[in-house]
Image (spheres, coloured by chain):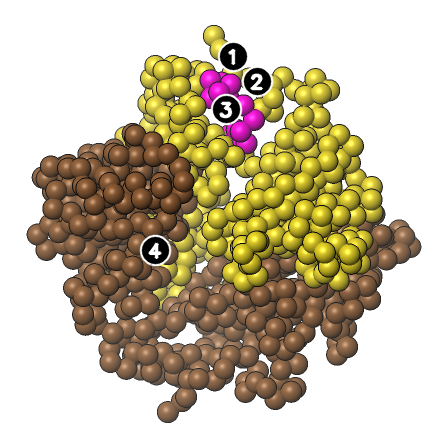
Chain colours: A yellow, B brown
């Protein structure tokens, strides 16, 4: 069974927009053991779309298509599909009713041009769009099932889950079992990760792959067949034993998500003082639903006046050591800790660039400080990369400190079974 | 002249990683009037990579390939290229020297497995990688030029700019002139934007397209031929006259970037108080280099205790109106304004979800407040979407308020020629 994804839109080929739909679709398919063989992107020209549809329909069992279903002139996917599979373009009553209902629900007047969105190739099944005006459609050509969805991620994903997945799984009721797991490692370089993982220690039949994503190393474990899940579970356990708490997240979890989770479980409250990250650490933590359970405040003290005023950093520290110094980081952490009355306080100050670097403190120089009843810590880092990279590496390091602190508190209270902090559900048997 | 992009990696087809390389490459090519016809993605299997390389080389004049040049076993691009174009895989001395030099520069021991990265298809030209261990290579097959680059964006982009672009431009010295411009509109829905733009008012030969990216509507103007640039300049002017200050950015500018720019130019200082956005507004502004010129602080007052303590919101307001109320937003803005002594203060408080909504104040209810010597403003919004969308829409609205305030100050002092805030360099003639 071969599945392809086709994304359509000039904006994807002229640099205006990065395609996130392919990855989002692939993730959902993989969760049902349906692998994607190929992804392709073409622009808005009818002929190009038609040619790509024909090629992919000829070489795959199913094609998931996104984009080009909107009301404007440059939305030409339906027309191209009709052309490719030699069908008339007909006004689909069911589709038109759904578009009208959508506008009624929004209490908005339907624009005449939205009627165009109900023009579908003959013998198509409508795929309902609960979140937007563009109906999707499903058609079959020779051996291939083609699913056409809008490009807006939220609309597309809902239709994928509600219509396409059940349809694919009914067509391929016994997909060859396969299992894949991605483990994200923070704090070790790729060769170190690879060297530490004793390949022979992994169960036979488990494939191992690596990927570097900024400061994270991703370890991928894959297996096929009946016992794929069990094999990957065992391999995961081996990697966790080997890498310990360098493993920061597994699967769709993220470092920020796990940090938030562990802070919540450990019932720790947190205050932040951010200079060079400018709110990024708080942003990453508050991306997580429920973060109000632990985050009390973050003081983004970008100017020295804010450091003096909100965090009670002294003028003496600024004069003698500067705003980017161990002393200032420590004072910031202590200042916000005292004011916020939280369990933990963490502060960062540094030079994100592109300007502001000196010989002693080049761009990328960052100080982190953390205070808690159990630990006080200040450290200097020299991060590589541009402004975005320095800021993100700083934020990841801060999150990792918090994650490790929360896990150590959980371990101390014996509420967690392993130092890695993941529940030990993969038995080695 | 037809150019394709091929991105390689299982991680791109199993949902682990969204491909950002295609958009980044396309943007740079478009800047030199070199359009991309097609993009494709395949996994790590040698046979699949080889088949995709053959297909794209047969149908295009140039193919830019990224990924699969790493030192690990699942990096198989060189092998696949050798196979596809029937060449031996040979140890390339120049490539090996560059890898060794890279490790020396990093003061790190070279791992024996990195030698594999110097195995390139015969008759390849090495493309130097200044930022990583994976050398790229350039080979010609029949009529096609194929450029192989690593998947790490920073390394890939540097090699694209330094080697691939000069090579492409020397091969296609007179690319058909074309010009494209993207204008981002905030505060109007897509049909409203389309209705307002009088298509007939645009110069003949200018193509118009629309795209919706969350709360932004993108208007794209394109023209071809000798006078492409002039035509697009004139069309841009027409759109700006039609949409006025709903146009928030043009080209690679962003709303946050322009907000930062206008605050800087207007010499306005800013303090923020963020509740539901949790640092996102400060993060977006401090993404911009030089933001320390205007941002004094942001108080991320996530807990009520932080609102009382840092912003002097009164217990009475919290008791009678709640933390999500016009009164609280106003008190937050006034509190941070008084403490920070900045020109402008802006505060947001709301319910980002998924929990916390009530009948009166459902998820998506957000209050914004802004105070300055020229204006005081409080407004309620009801944003649609999930947590991320509500947070982002809130942040965009806040940035737009600040952008408009900065522009109004600039207009008052006659330092700017039009209310849109963009320098009027496109003469209508």
- Mark 3 / mark 2, whichever is N-terminal: 3
Which portion, as a residue range, is magenta? Answer: A237-250
* For residue B147, above or below residue B224: above
Residue A136 image position (x, y, % from top left):
40, 49
Residue B339 in percent (x, y) is at 81, 63
The mark found on residue B158 in the picture is: 4
User: Is residue B398 within the magenta segment?
Assistant: no
**Which residue is denoted by mark 3 in the rendering?**
A243
Q: Nearest the camera: B71 or A119?
A: B71
The chain identifier of the residue carrying mark 4 reads B
Q: Which disc number belongs to residue A427?
A: 1
Answer yes or no: are tags 1 and 3 on the same subunit. yes
x, y (%) of residue A145?
29, 39
Tell me what residue is drawn at x 55 percent, y 17 percent: A425
Would residue B40 appear left or right of A410 to someone viewing this image? Answer: left
The residue depicted at 47 percent of the width and 61 percent of the height is: B212
Q: Residue at x 85, y 52 (%)?
A: B309
Both labels 3 and 2 in a single chain: yes
Q: Where is residue B272 in the image (x, y as percent from the top left)?
A: 71, 61
Give yes or no for contact between labels 1 and 2 (Cβ–Cβ under 8 Å). yes
Residue that carries the numbered disc 2 in the rendered image: A424
Q: Quadrant of residue B377?
A: bottom right
């Amino acid at each position: 069974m071969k599945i392809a994804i086709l994304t359509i839109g000039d904006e994807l080929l002229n640099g205006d927009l990065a395609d996130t739909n392919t990855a989002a679709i692939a993730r959902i398919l993989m969760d049902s053991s349906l692998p994607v063989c190929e992804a392709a992107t073409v622009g808005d020209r009818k002929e190009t779309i038609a040619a790509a549809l024909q090629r992919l329909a000829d070489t795959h069992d199913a094609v998931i298509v996104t984009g080009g279903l909107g009301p404007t002139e440059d939305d030409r996917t339906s027309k191209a599909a009709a052309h490719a599979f030699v069908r008339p373009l007909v006004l689909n009553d069911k589709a038109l009713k759904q578009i009208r209902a959508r506008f009624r629900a929004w209490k908005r007047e339907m624009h005449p041009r939205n009627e165009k969105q109900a023009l579908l190739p003959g013998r198509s099944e409508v795929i309902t769009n609960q979140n937007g005006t563009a109906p999707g459609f499903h058609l079959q050509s020779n051996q291939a099932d083609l699913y056409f969805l809008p490009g807006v991620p939220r609309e597309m994903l809902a239709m994928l889950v509600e219509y396409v997945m059940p349809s694919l799984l009914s067509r391929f009721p016994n997909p060859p079992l396969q299992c894949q797991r991605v483990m994200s490692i923070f704090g070790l370089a790729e060769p170190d990760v690879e060297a530490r993982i004793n390949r022979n220690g992994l169960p036979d039949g488990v494939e191992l792959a690596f990927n570097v994503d900024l400061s994270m190393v991703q370890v991928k474990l894959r297996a096929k067949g009946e016992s794929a899940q069990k094999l990957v579970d065992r391999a995961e356990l081996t990697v966790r034993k080997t890498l310990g708490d360098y493993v920061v997240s597994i699967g769709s979890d993220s470092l920020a998500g796990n940090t938030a989770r562990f802070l919540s479980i450990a019932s720790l409250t947190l205050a932040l003082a951010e200079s060079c990250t400018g709110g990024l650490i708080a942003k990453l933590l508050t991306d997580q639903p429920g973060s109000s359970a632990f985050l009390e405040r973050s003081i983004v003290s970008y100017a020295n006046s804010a450091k003096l005023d909100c965090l009670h950093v002294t003028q003496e520290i600024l004069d003698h050591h500067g705003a980017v110094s161990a002393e200032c980081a420590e004072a910031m952490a202590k200042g916000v800790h005292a004011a916020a009355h939280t369990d933990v306080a963490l502060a960062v100050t540094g030079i994100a660039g592109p300007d502001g670097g000196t010989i002693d403190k080049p761009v990328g120089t960052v100080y982190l400080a953390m205070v808690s009843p159990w630990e006080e810590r200040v450290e200097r880092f020299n991060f590589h990369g541009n402004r975005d990279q320095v800021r993100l590496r700083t934020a990841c390091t801060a999150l990792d400190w918090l994650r490790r602190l929360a896990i150590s508190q959980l371990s101390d209270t014996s509420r967690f079974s392993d130092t890695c902090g993941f529940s030990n559900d993969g038995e080695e048997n």
